Amino acid sequence: MDTNFPPPPFPDRFEPFPEGIEPAVPIEGYPNTWTHTPAQPLIRRPVTRTEATGPLELWRKLPCDESNLAVLGPGRMAQGQLMHMSGRILDEAGRPVRGAVVELWQANAAGRYYHPIDQRDAPLDPNFVGNGRVRTDEEGRYAFFTIKPGAYPVPVKDTWWRPPHVHFSVLGPSSLSRLVTQMYFPGDPMNEWDRILQSIPDAAARDRLVARQTHPAEVGDGWIAFTHDIVLRGRYATPEA
Amino acid sequence: MDTFAPVSQHTIGPFFPRTFFTEGDNDLTRLHAGAQPTARGEAILIRGRVTKEGGLPCINMILEAWQADAEGRFKHPADPEQHLADPDFLGWGRAWTDAEGHYEFRTLMPGGYDDPAGRRAPHVNLTVMGAGLMRRVLATLFFPDFTEANAADPLLVLVPEARRAKIVAVPEGERDGARVFRFDIHLRGGVEEETPFFED
């Protein structure tokens, strides 16, 4: 990977989150939201240098060369619908965030995670681990080659289902830009029933968590493709030269 | 200028991959696994337990730490003295909690710095994520060594006085020649028990 491009520009303005874009808790049917969410009011504080900065050389500590989740090794291809997943990481002014670390993880085609905590009675795929990490290029682009994840039931008394989704973790140039989110697939009826997605009050904000499918004519015959741009918190006060 | 709204946060969930972690991820003193730890400053260990309502342990919580170097500088363009920052110190680490809710970081004692908001006392910013937390939770750890600096820290003074001690780490002896500081994080409880958290 070419690591010679300059460090990312960093935001120096952080507005409060707009109304309705952050999840409303507790969530019915998700008991942990009742027991883990702080009960006391959060303390408002000024943004000092610690909050405005972040590690710019994180790619040296976290190797960012894992973009292919679908092929574990020679002749070891994952089961499922092969899928290309790409997009851009942007700031609130729409400028690309270059050099951001993007982590992706997901369930396999049967809706099971390669994780000791996931003991559900669904098949594991010996050729699918399901996590990758890349660094955005100069245009803020990321791309992964993977398979479409399956849905899975939430093991609570009144079971509900998580629709197919992909987890994203983005580490940008400041602590306040840190984002952990999930991405959904367009047109899946389960999206409307998902208690986690529906915990976002604002409909437009929910729509921004849904990827766009690329027309087959642009894709070719190897895989289906989706694009998904992710806007991090923060703005640059002055345009880049 | 167009404005784009930031993408909503979601829970990190229970399945953040173990396979994302490698040896030394929770060590802030090294740029990467193959690097020597920085020789500047005092190496310390930060240890603690993450608990939920009722004091029960939280398994597989993901914690990320970020702090200034031993002189209070950041290797970042937002720091006017970034050219003087410790070139061998990363200042970032990530850890996960075991079945008893325990986590650990290896780092060094950060320095304080002058900020437009006021003189910051030495501190470590901790982000906590996990199942049940739809949004990340932000805590700041202070050290008992700096009573005067703590009393003037522009963030610590915003915490109600009766709750301030909750975010000052507790000395817990030494291990491998490094001082150990204990910092427990109680996610939810009464005003007496819950860790003071800051707004995002």
Image: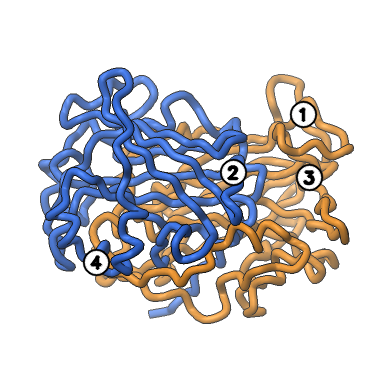
The reply to whether dot 4 and dot 3 touch (C-beta < 8 Å) is no
Residue marked by disc 2? B57
Residue marked by disc 3? A221
User: Which amino acid, by three-letter code, is at mark 4?
Assistant: Val
Label 4 and label 2 in one chain: yes
Q: Nearer the viewer, mark 3 or mark 1?
A: 1
The image position of residue A56, as x and y in percent, is: 32, 45
Among the 4 quarters of the image, the one containing residue B151: bottom left
- In the picture, the quarter occupied by the N terminus of chain B is bottom left
Of mark 4 and mark 2, the one earlier in the sequence is 2
Q: Residues within 10 Å of mark 3 (few under 14, many from 20)?
A: few
SS of the residue at dot 2?
loop
Q: Which sits in the foreground, B80 or B136?
A: B136
Q: Chain letter for blue?
A: B
Q: The residue marked by circle 1 belongs to what chain?
A: A
Question: Considering only vertical position in the picture, is A182 above or below B75?
Answer: below
- In the picture, the quarter occupied by the C terminus of chain B is bottom left
Label of residue A77 in the image: 1
User: Which amino acid, by three-letter code, is at mark 3?
Assistant: Asp
The Cα–Cα distance between marks 4 and 3, rounded to whole angstroms, is: 61 Å
Q: Residue at 51% x, 41% y: name it.
A: A134
Q: Residues within 10 Å of mark 4 (few under 14, many from 20)?
A: few
The reply to whether dot 4 and dot 2 touch (C-beta < 8 Å) is no
**Residue A94 horizontal side relative to residue B38, left or right:** right
